Structure formats: structure tokens, C-alpha cells
Amino acid sequence: MTSIVKSGTEEKAKAAEEVFAGLNHLEAVLAECSGEGYKLGHPFFGGDEIGYLDIAVGSMLGWLRATGKLAGVEFLDVEKMPLLVAWAQNFCDHEAVKDSMHDEDKLLEFAKLLQQQQATK
């Protein structure tokens, strides 16, 4: 995702494609891990409770959203990745997580600062 912040237009498009490829893979993994149970109300990769994979992926949600705003791309599109979008909402709404998620706007400000610094090099 840092490639999107630091790169030129062509590199940003390629980096965005790579992010989409990774997210599509996560969508498939989420469907496989959760099976039919996900549709029946299991909100996380492994079932009803947050696990290590949820934490690993969830720790990147703030940056994913901030980078998307900076690049003008909606990475988590409900039509393309309905399971992942639902998972992200469930993750961010969970009591153990909701007060510790990174503020997207602050991350966006930082990303813009990085972009400006890169432009002056």
C-alpha cells in the first residue's frame, strides 16, 4: 500500500491492482474458512470469535481505507467483496477492537505528508 502513496500514476495503478488481488484472495479465504457458517452469522475468519488472522488483517484496515481515499479507490467494495466488507464491519464493531482502531483521517494526513516528502526528493 505504501507504493500507492509514494509512486507516480502508473505505479499507483499497478500497486492498486496488487491490493485488489490480495483482497480478492482474502475474500476467497474468508469464504473457505467460514464456509456456510459465515452466512449464518459467524462474523470472523475462524467463527464467532476474533482470532489471529482477524487481528493480522484487521490491523491493516485503517491504512487500507486511508490509502484508498488518497488514491481515489474504494478497495472494500460491497458488491465485489461482500464477505470481506461484512467481516471488516464486524471486526471494527467488536468491543475488543472498536476503541483501538486507527483514525483514518489521521492516517490520511500522514499519507499525504509522505506523498509530499516523496515529491520533493
Image: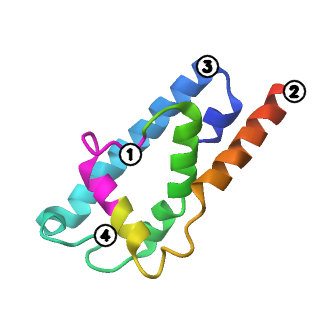
Please determine whether, in this image, residue 24 is positioned above or below residue 92: above
Structural distance between the alpha carbons of marks 4 and 1 = 16 Å
Measured as percent of width and height from the top left, residue 29 is found at 29, 55
User: Which residue position holds label 1?
Assistant: 76
14 or 103: which is nearer to us? 103
User: Which residue position holds label 4?
Assistant: 44
101 or 50: which is nearer to us? 101
Structural distance between the alpha carbons of marks 2 and 4 = 42 Å
Q: Quadrant of residue 21?
A: top left
Residue at image coords 80%, 26% = 119
Can you say which quadrant of the picture contains the N terminus? top right
Residue at image coords 22%, 56% = 31
Identity, as a three-letter code, of the amino acid under mark 1:
Leu
Please determine whether, in this image, residue 110 is positioned above or below residue 10: below
Q: Is residue 118 left or right of residue 79?
A: right
Ranked by sequence position, the earlier of labels 3 and 4 is 3
User: Which residue position holds label 3?
Assistant: 9
Few, some or many C-alpha atoms within 10 Å of disc 1 (few <14, some 14-19, many ≥20)? many
User: Which residue position holds label 2?
Assistant: 120
Identity, as a three-letter code, of the amino acid under mark 4:
Phe
Please determine whether, in this image, residue 8 is positioned above or below residue 85: above
Structural distance between the alpha carbons of marks 1 and 3 = 21 Å
Ranked by sequence position, the earlier of labels 3 and 2 is 3
Identity, as a three-letter code, of the amino acid under mark 2:
Thr
Ranked by sequence position, the earlier of labels 1 and 2 is 1
Measured as percent of width and height from the top left, residue 43 is found at 27, 70
Structural distance between the alpha carbons of marks 1 and 2 = 31 Å
Ranked by sequence position, the earlier of labels 1 and 3 is 3
Ranked by sequence position, the earlier of labels 2 and 4 is 4
Q: Are marks 2 and 4 in contact (CB under 8 Å)?
A: no
Please determine whether, in this image, residue 86 is positioned above or below residue 113: below
